[in-house]
Image (spheres, rainbow, N blue to C red):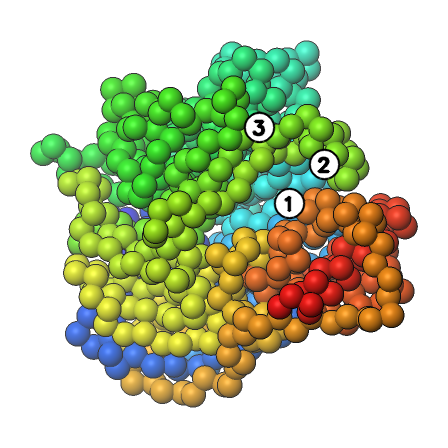
């Protein structure tokens, strides 16, 4: 593992002449996971378990206009590169925090309707030979000049630009190619990834993750094989299986591993009547990096109908298991199991539950398949309560792996869900509201707190060889926390939804240091060294999925009240953090007492709001994640004329898409629902 990281750093350092003087080995953070292993591990040791108490703020940079920040900053030479909301891209001096350039995707002139799909989320950029690569929500993949931020080439990655799909993940670069996927399985999309020439933007290959219409022919033997695991006219729904986040390149085998997502719709009986495993949903798929040809796959959740994506980060490592060295891939899956896979063959080595799991009793190591519980499937018996919930036992926030301790550090969550088939009437109503025929999820799913500790979270140190927990930190009141960074200094860093950045002893889990960042954290930290000084960088910007998660995700962070920032720390630096507003839980609803509420319109508006507005403004009007305002507090939503104008035209520069496809009656219904909710909140606080 250490040799791999050193080789990667040397290779990248040799290519930096266009931007900065080459950095010494191991001093950069040149890719999303720090190296090709995607381990979120650094071999730097200047900041360590003995001296981390001396860590302080070196500098900070406010990022006006940003909301959700989910990316680990890259560090190449003396420059930090990172993305903000919807893919706006930044270059910052790593020593001083001076802003060098920004790239704005200009959504006002590029498919602003795509802003509806990803809640502002964006998880990062890639770097290679003087270029910064970013995929943006409307499907463009851009190569930017790392010195100026000017586009060098633009590739349009979507086959159907009007389809309801969007990019929120970070590209990966390997062997002169850059690869990107997208999200949108819930909206009639067929998943695929595209690999482009990193110098020119020319498409090199494309791999589909689910089979298409057999009448049109199959693109590969892999799709022909996969089609045998689907039933009915599955292709009319797209199928899903989108690669919206994790991709890992393996130089040892010259392969690319894809983490594929859930099926579309979720309900397998609607998606694939008669059952079937539905290859390659919820799978880890290995492709030849040169050609994109299928090599092997391992399906973590066959026939998924619980939204158990396999899109969590995949870590490559060399482990000694049963007395012999194995090249493995590890993933803490959303479904609650920790997988160790032989990446030479794609065979399962082990799989163990790392959180409460009730949808399956265990994973059969001989077959690689889950042994499902009798109550897991809901097609016939109606709603079931299972663990984990749709939020997962682990989600996109990266785990890290430290080769010195041999431990993986997982941001975990514990929560149940009630899930069952959606009634045909509800499906038809929702389809009408969304103005298309796709049955969306075809399920009714709700988060559920059943156990006393449901809704809690943790940082889990997992031993993949011993297959058990080594230590765990419990977070009873901070559910949607950030990813982790681990270092050769025997440290683990993690940012919390409460706003704390914490450093733990990587061996024992003892808390050694913390800093109040003034706002919740979703991103993973990164670390780098300049002039012999080690720095730790973190983007602070709570939001994304937290905006529609309800009170469980509510940490008091309100839209526009806390600045989004890049914070960078070093030993013996103690710069004061600029003042920021404290958390606020009290609602400041606005009302026009002269407005008469039309109850029937408000009832219709409630259904429209659920299908149109919840993702950003929050479920049941409760804006808890600070990605967009709580509409009960909004001046723009107080009067009909301003409300109507915003829906008609949008504010793309601020992330608000236009909804000019709504009828005037639809808009009035939404307006009445918001006004009724605000009045109710004032009358019954």
Q: Nearer the viewer, mark 2 or mark 1?
A: 2
Tag 2: Cα neighbours inside 10 Å, few (<14), some, or many (≥20)? many
Task: Establish if 136 lies above or below 423.
Answer: below
Res. 535 image quadrant: bottom left
Pick the residue in front: 448 or 86. 448
Res. 568 image quadrant: bottom left
The label on residue 421 is 3
Pick the residue in front: 548 or 337. 548
The label on residue 166 is 1
Q: Is residue 590 left or right of residue 600?
A: left
Give the residue at x 11% y 32%: 322
Camera sees residue 100: no
Secondary element under disc 2, as helix, strand or loop, is: helix
First-in-chain label (3 vs 1): 1
Give the residue at x 83% y 59%: 597
Residue identifier under label 2: 430
Pick the residue in front: 77 or 551. 551
Residue 534 image offset from top left, x and y in percent: 31, 73
Tag 1: Cα neighbours inside 10 Å, few (<14), some, or many (≥20)? many
- How many angstroms separate mark 3 from mark 2 (CA)? 14 Å
Circle 2/circle 1 CB separation < 8 Å: no
Res. 286 image quadrant: top left
Q: Is residue 323 left or right of residue 476?
A: left
First-in-chain label (2 vs 1): 1
Task: Establish if 273 lies above or below 445.
Answer: above
Secondary element under disc 3, as helix, strand or loop, is: strand
- How many angstroms separate mark 3 from mark 1 (CA)? 26 Å
Pick the residue in front: 684 or 93. 684
């Amino acid at each position: 593992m250490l040799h791999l990281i050193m080789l990667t750093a040397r290779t990248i350092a040799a290519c930096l002449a266009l931007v900065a003087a080459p950095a010494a080995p191991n001093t950069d953070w040149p890719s999303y996971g720090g190296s090709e292993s995607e381990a979120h591990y650094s071999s730097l040791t200047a900041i360590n378990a003995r001296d981390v108490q001396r860590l302080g703020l070196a500098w900070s940079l406010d990022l006006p206009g940003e909301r959700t920040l989910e990316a680990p900053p890259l560090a190449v030479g003396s420059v930090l590169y990172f993305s903000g909301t919807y893919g706006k891209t930044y270059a910052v001096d790593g020593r001083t925090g001076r802003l060098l350039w920004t790239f704005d995707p200009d959504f006002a002139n590029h498919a602003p309707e795509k802003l509806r799909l990803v809640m502002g989320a964006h998880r990062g950029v890639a770097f290679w030979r003087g270029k910064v690569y970013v995929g943006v929500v409307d499907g463009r993949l851009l190569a930017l000049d790392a010195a100026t931020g000017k586009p060098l080439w633009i590739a349009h990655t979507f086959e159907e630009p009007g389809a309801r799909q969007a990019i929120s993940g970070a590209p990966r670069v390997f062997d002169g190619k850059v690869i990107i996927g997208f999200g949108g399985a819930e909206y009639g999309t067929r998943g695929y990834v595209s690999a482009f020439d990193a110098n020119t933007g020319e498409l090199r290959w494309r791999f589909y993750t689910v089979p298409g219409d057999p009448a049109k022919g199959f693109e590969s033997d892999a799709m022909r094989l996969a089609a045998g695991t689907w039933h009915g006219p599955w292709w009319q729904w797209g199928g899903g299986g989108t690669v919206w986040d994790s991709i890992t390149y393996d130089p040892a085998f010259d392969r690319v591993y894809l983490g594929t997502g859930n099926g579309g719709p979720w309900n397998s009986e609607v998606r694939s009547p008669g059952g079937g495993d539905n290859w390659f949903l919820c799978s880890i798929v290995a492709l030849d990096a040169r050609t994109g040809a299928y090599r092997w796959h391992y399906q973590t959740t066959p026939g998924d109908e619980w939204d158990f994506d396999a899109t969590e980060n995949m870590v490559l490592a060399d482990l000694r298991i049963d007395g012999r060295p194995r090249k493995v891939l590890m993933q803490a899956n959303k479904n609650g199991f920790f997988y160790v896979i032989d990446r030479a063959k794609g065979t399962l080595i082990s799989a163990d539950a790392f959180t409460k799991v009730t949808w399956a009793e265990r994973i059969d190591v001989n077959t690689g398949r889950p042994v499902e519980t009798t109550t897991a499937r809901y097609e016939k018996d109606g709603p079931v309560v299972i663990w984990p919930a749709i939020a997962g036992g682990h989600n996109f926030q990266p785990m890290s792996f430290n080769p010195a301790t041999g431990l993986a550090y997982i941001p975990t969550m514990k929560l149940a869900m009630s899930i069952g088939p959606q009634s045909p009437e509800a499906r038809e109503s929702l389809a009408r509201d969304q103005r298309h025929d796709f049955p969306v999820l075809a399920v009714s799913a709700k988060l559920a707190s059943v156990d006393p500790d449901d809704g809690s979270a943790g940082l889990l140190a997992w031993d993949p060889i011993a297959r058990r927990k080594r230590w765990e930190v419990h977070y009873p009141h901070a559910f949607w926390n950030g990813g982790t960074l681990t270092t050769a200094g025997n440290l683990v860093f993690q940012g919390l939804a409460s706003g704390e950045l914490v450093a733990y002893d990587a061996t024992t889990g003892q808390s050694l240091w913390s800093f109040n960042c003034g706002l919740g954290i979703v991103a993973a930290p990164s670390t780098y060294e300049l002039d012999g000084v080690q720095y730790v960088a973190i983007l602070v910007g709570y939001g994304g999925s937290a905006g529609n998660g309800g009170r469980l995700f509510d940490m008091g962070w309100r839209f526009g009240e806390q600045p989004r920032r890049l914070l960078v720390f070093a030993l013996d630096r103690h710069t004061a953090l600029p003042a920021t507003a404290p958390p606020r839980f009290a609602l400041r609803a606005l009302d026009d007492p002269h407005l008469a509420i039309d109850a029937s319109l408000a009832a219709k508006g409630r259904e429209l709001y659920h299908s149109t507005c919840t993702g950003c403004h929050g479920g049941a009007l409760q804006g808890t994640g600070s990605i967009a305002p709580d509409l009960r507090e909004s001046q723009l939503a107080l009067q009909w004329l301003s409300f109507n104008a915003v829906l008609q035209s949008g504010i793309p520069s601020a992330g608000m898409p236009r909804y000019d496809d709504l009828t005037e009656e639809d808009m009035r219904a939404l307006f009445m629902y918001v006004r009724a909710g605000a009045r109710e909140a004032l009358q019954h606080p």
